Amino acid sequence: MNLRSVDLNLLVILDALLDEAHVTRAAERLGLSQPAASSALERCRHLFGDPLLERGRGGMRLTPRAEALREPIRVLLAQAEAVIDPAPPPLAAIRQTVRIVMSDFPAVAVVSPMCAALARTAPGIDLAVMPWRGGDGALDQLARGACDLALSVFGALEPAFRRELLLTGRYIVAMRRGHPAAEGFDLERWLAYPHVVVSSQGEPRGDLDDALARLGRTRRVGVAIPSFAMAAPILAASDMIAMLPERCLPPGDDFVTFDPVIPVDPIPLHLAWHARRDRDPAVRHVAQLLRDALAALGA
C-alpha cells in the first residue's frame, strides 16, 4: 500500500470510533459532526476491507478485525504524537472521558471530590465509573482499552501494565448495635452467627476462610453480595456479621465495630493502568486526582 494515498487523519478518527464503539460519542470527543464521523467510518471500512463496527444487541460492537487494530493504532498514534508534539495540551483544552473501574468502595468516597477538582482544573474531562467485575476482569478491560484506570488489590503484573500502591487499609468486624455477639466479642461469638461476604463474583469463600481453616474452624456465610453499600442495611436488620474495609460503614451510631480476633492482612489498594496510557494527559491528571482523594481519605 502506498501511504501517500492514505489520509492518516483517518487513524485518529478510527481510534476514537473503536474506543467509544459509538459514532456520535466519537464525533463529540473529536469536535466533529456526526455525519463527518460516519463518513470517516465508511472510509476506514473501505481502507481495511472490514465493517469494523457492526450493530449488535445494545449498540455497536467491534469486529474481530477492529479488536486486532486497536492496540497497533494506539501505539502508532502515541509514537507520532511524541515525535510531532511532545508537549501535552493544556488541561483546560482537553475534551475526553476517562473510564475508571473500581468497586463502590472507595468510589462512594472519592468520586465526588474528584468531580469537584475536575470542574476547577479540567472542566472538559468527564469521568465514567465502570462496574466492578473483579481484578482479572479489570485487567482484561485495561488490556482491551475498555477502561483507562483500575483501582483494586493487584498482585505482580505483566510488563504491559503499571501498578502503584495508593493506600493500605485495615479490616474491621461490624455488626448492628445491640447485637448479642458484641458483649465479650471473641472468636466463638464471631463464628456463632452467619456472615455477610462482599464478592463481585458471588463467591462465598475468601481469605478469611483460609485463615480460619488453618485454625481448624469454619464459618457460615449467610449472604454473598456484590456491593459494599449493601452490607449496612443487611447488618442493621439482622444478626449477621461482616468483616469489611474500614470506612465502608455509613457515619452514625447504628453499628459497633471490632478488630478481627485472628490475624488478617491489611488491604493494599493499587492503581493500575496499561502502559499505552503513560503519556495520556487526561488519564494522568485523573490518576493524580484519585491519589489526592485517597490521600485525604486516609488522613
Image: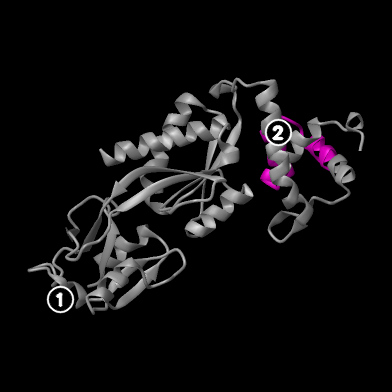
Range of the magenta residues? 18-41
Q: Is residue 63 visible?
A: no
Mark seen at residue 80: none
As rendered, which of 120 and 195 lies closer to the eye? 195
Judged by its main secondary structure, the magenta piece is: helix
Q: Quadrant of the C terminus?
A: top left
Q: Is residue 45 visible?
A: yes
Q: Secondary structure at mark 2?
A: helix
As rendered, which of 48 and 222 lies closer to the eye? 48
Q: Residues within 10 Å of mark 1 (few under 14, many from 20)?
A: few
Task: Identify the residue at horizontal 32%, vertical 76% (top origin).
Answer: 222
Q: Amino acid at mark 1?
A: Glu
Mark seen at residue 188: 1
Residue 292 in picture, x, y percent from top left: 37, 34
Q: Is residue 169 left or right of residue 126?
A: left
Q: Quadrant of residue 231?
A: bottom left
Q: Quadrant of residue 155?
A: bottom left
Nearer the observer: mark 2 or 1; the answer is 2
Residue 290 in picture, x, y percent from top left: 42, 38
Q: Is residue 205 left or right of residue 95?
A: left
- Residue 30 counted in the magenta span: yes
Residue farthest to the left, as pictured: 184
Task: Identify the residue at horizontal 27%, vertical 50% (top origin).
Answer: 247
Mark nearer the N terminus (2 vs 1) = 2
Number of numbered discs visible in the structure rendering? 2
Q: Is residue 80 left or right of residue 187?
A: right
Task: Identify the residue at horizontal 47%, vertical 30% (top origin).
Answer: 118
Residue 166 in picture, x, y percent from top left: 37, 42
Mark seen at residue 77: 2
Q: Residues within 10 Å of mark 2 (few under 14, many from 20)?
A: some
